[in-house]
Amino acid sequence: MTGWIVGFTVGVVIVLVVVALVVPILLLARAIGRQAPLIDDALGKAVRDTASLAELRTTIEHAEVIVAGLHRGRTKLGGQ
């Protein structure tokens, strides 16, 4: 009978340890799950707010053409 008591006690202790380790993980997962929509909204806003940066290369190329034209005009007028 003593073997059963020891075995049962060890089993209960193991279950309690597992529960003690799993409960914080589940609580953390729940907290992350509650914050996920807020994070997703913020990332969506960041995508919308920075979408115009994709056209920055085109703007730079146009600016370079304009500056080159101004430089040619200045040179033709005798400037440096």
Image (tube, rainbow, N blue to C red):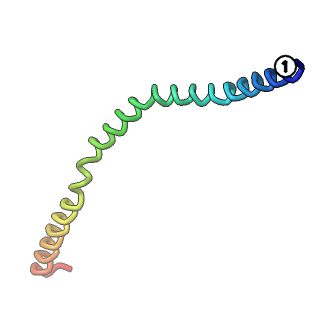
Which residue is drawn at the image coordinates 23% and 49% (left, top)? Answer: 52
Front residue of this view, candidates 11 and 75: 11
Number of callouts:
1
- Identified at 19% across, 68% down, the residue is 64
Residue 25, quarter of picture: top right
Say if 30 sits above or below 58 in the image: above
Q: Position of residue 49 (x, y in %)?
A: 28, 42
Asked if 22 appears above or below 67 in the picture, the reply is above
Q: Secondary structure at mark 1?
A: helix
Three-letter code for the amino acid on which mark 1 is drawn = Ile
- Is the C terminus in the top left, top right, bottom left or bottom right quadrant? bottom left
Say if 79 sits above or below 2 in the image.
Answer: below
Q: Estimate the x, y position of residue 38 in percent, counting from the top left.
A: 40, 30
Q: Residue at x 19, y 66 (%)?
A: 61
Observer-nearest of 59 and 21: 21
The residue indicated by pointer 1 is: 5
Write the residue at 23% across / 61% down: 57
